[in-house]
Image (cartoon, rainbow, N blue to C red):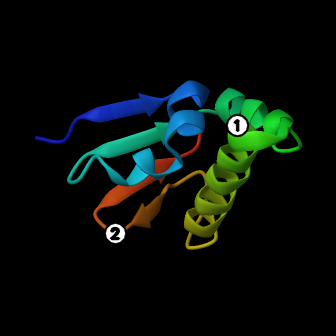
Amino acid sequence: MKKYYVLDTNILLQNPNAIFGFEDNVVVITGTTLQELDSKKNMEGELGFNARLAARLLENIRSRGDILKGSKAKENWWKADD
């Protein structure tokens, strides 16, 4: 049985690769989280670096399929907020 995990901004800012840590489950990233990541991309230091990295990783996943239907990332799914 698959579980759904909604990752918030803080998780992605601490560890951008967290999106890949939920094998065989569904990872959901909300529009609010995407906006918050975007607002932090210009910051200096680790926070800004992680925001940019998370945004790049999510964009790479999104480019593989329809954002509203979800995109497969290895064994995980990333879905947009409906």
Disc 1 to disc 2, C-alpha distance: 26 Å
Question: Dot 2: what SS?
Answer: loop
Q: Residues within 10 Å of mark 1 (few under 14, many from 20)?
A: some
Is 61 or 51 nearer to us in this picture? 51
Furthest-front residue in view? 45
Dot 1 falls on a residue whose secondary structure is helix
Instruction: Determine the residue positioned at 41% across, 65% down.
Output: 73
Which residue position holds label 2?
74
Residue 60 falls in which quadrant of the image?
bottom right
Residues 55 and 27: in front is: 55
Q: Quadrant of residue 6?
A: top left
State left or right for residue 25 relative to residue 37: left
Q: Earlier in the sequence, mark 1 or mark 2?
A: 1
Residue type of the residue flagged with mark 1: Leu
Does 9 appear above or below 24? above
User: What kind of residue is marked 2?
Assistant: Lys
Vertical arrangement, residue 30 with respect to residue 41, above or below: above
Residue 81 visible: no
Q: Quadrant of the C terminus?
A: top right
Residue depicted at x 46% and y 52% = 17
Closer to the camera: disc 1 or disc 2? Answer: 1
Q: Is residue 60 visible?
A: yes
Query: Left or right: where does residue 68 sit relative to residue 78?
Result: right
Looking at the rendering, in which quadrant would you find the N terminus? top left
The reply, left or right, for residue 80 in relation to residue 22 is right
* Numbered label attached to residue 47: 1
Q: Could you tell me residue 36's position as x and y percent?
A: 75, 30
Residue at point 82%, 44% (across, down): 41
Residue nearer the viewer, 23 or 42: 42
Q: Dot 2, crowdedness within 10 Å: few (<14), some or many (≥20)?
A: few
Rendering coords of residue 52 (x, y %): 73, 52
Q: Position of residue 68 (x, y in %)?
A: 59, 51
